[in-house]
Image (cartoon, rainbow, N blue to C red):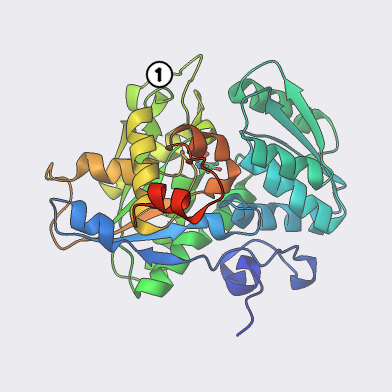
Amino acid sequence: MEWKGVLDRYFDYLPVESRKNIVSLSEGNTPLIRARSIEAKLNDDLEVYLKYEGANPTGSFKDRGMTVAVSKAVEKGEKAVICASTGNTSASAAAFAARSGLEAIVVIPEGKIAFGKLSQAMMHGATVVQIEGNFDEALELVLEISNNYPVTLVNSLNPNRIEGQKTASFEIADFLGQAPDYHLLPVGNAGNITAYWKGYKEYSDSGKTTRLPKMTGFQAAGASPIVDGKKVENPETVATAIRIGNPASWEKAENARDESGGMIGKATDDELVEAYRVLADSEGVFCEPASAASVAGLFQMDGTGYFEDGSVLTCTLTGHGLKDPDIAIESSKEPETVGNTVEEVLEVSGL
Ligand SMILES: *Cc1c(COP(=O)(O)O)cnc(C)c1O
């Protein structure tokens, strides 16, 4: 069967009124990959799956929300969209705007977004504005502009973004035939944990599943306002996609945590990079540093009694590793350089 994107697949659960307004890049339907090497490293006896959102058309889960936000903007006859971004929202907004003929304006913190993401926004023809400030300040700015000028905000404060993003939990439940026992994911602006929880509840309410997962979120230790219970003025972490000090969906994330009986923790940059490397090196799955927060959280909580033996876990890997190759190269061993003879290549290749 042809896959025509999340709005086509889950139309009845989503707010777009007419199928003819759908703007889609055939997003969604991303791989759910069993992580047997990681399972083997754990103390607890768990079944672990990776929801690889890097396989979306612009390389992150943001496409799930953007198809709904931009389709709704088209449905309402809007002409332009605006967002603040740590990178992936701008890449996605720019692509969907390009496809629909809307203008896109993206506001980003200068020097703090990964090069791959910046190149996407530029290639898709968005107006890219860098500000001397961080993501939280950029978000305040675009909020004010969208409140006063004819332009639609497509950050996750736009409820259509959350609606679209909840389809990831539908896909997981459809694939497993049931919701997992625990769902682990990175938390930045906290839209995605909100969306997943909404999706799991809706599927359970409609009788498609009979259980709800414990929502288990992880922030970066240098940007962990929810864990610490206070705004972080100058968030700092290698994981730029979750470098956020004042999450827009803060309370909703706490609700997801508390209603589900889950937790929100934090992982240091060393833990994030370690999980990022293990995923690439032992599972063959290359994600962004921020994405690895889910698996860093798994390693952190393994053996503590938090996970019940025999449980099924899903870990969202929010974005593709190629978005941010600098960190991959910085944290890897340099390639060997030798002359162009068989002997020299053999000498360094360990054959
Ligand atoms: C946006 C993003 C996040 C954070 O998601 P929130 O909904 O803001 O919590 C995490 N990882 C990647 C790769 C992202 O693009």
For ligand 1, tell me if the residue under mark 1 lies within 8 Å.
no
Q: Can you say which quadrant of the picture contains the N terminus? A: bottom right
Point out the residue furthest to the bottom here: 1
Q: Give the residue drawn at x 49%, y 20%.
A: 235
**Quarter of the rendering containing residue 179:** bottom left
**Quarter of the rendering containing residue 127:** top right
The local secondary structure at tag 1 comes to loop
Closer to us: 341 or 144? 341
Taking 310 as reference, is 94 left or right? right
Measured along the vertical axis of the image, is residue 14 above or below residue 255? Answer: below
Q: Give the residue drawn at x 20%, y 61%.
A: 311
Taking 119 as reference, is 170 left or right? left
Closer to us: 339 or 51? 339
- Whole-percent x, y for residue 303 in the image: 13, 45
Asked whether the viewer can see residue 81, the reply is no
Q: Give the residue drawn at x 40%, y 73%.
A: 175
Taking 217 as reference, is 159 left or right? right
* Residue located beneath label 1 in the image: 230
Taking 345 as reference, is 124 left or right? right
- At label 1, the amino acid type is Lys
Asked whether the viewer can see residue 123, the reply is yes
- Whole-percent x, y for residue 177 in the image: 35, 75
Measured along the vertical axis of the image, is residue 52 above or below residue 259? Answer: below
- Whole-percent x, y for residue 130 in the image: 74, 24
Q: Give the residue drawn at x 68%, y 49%.
A: 92
Q: Residues within 10 Å of mark 1 (few under 14, many from 20)?
A: few
- Whole-percent x, y for residue 207 in the image: 37, 73
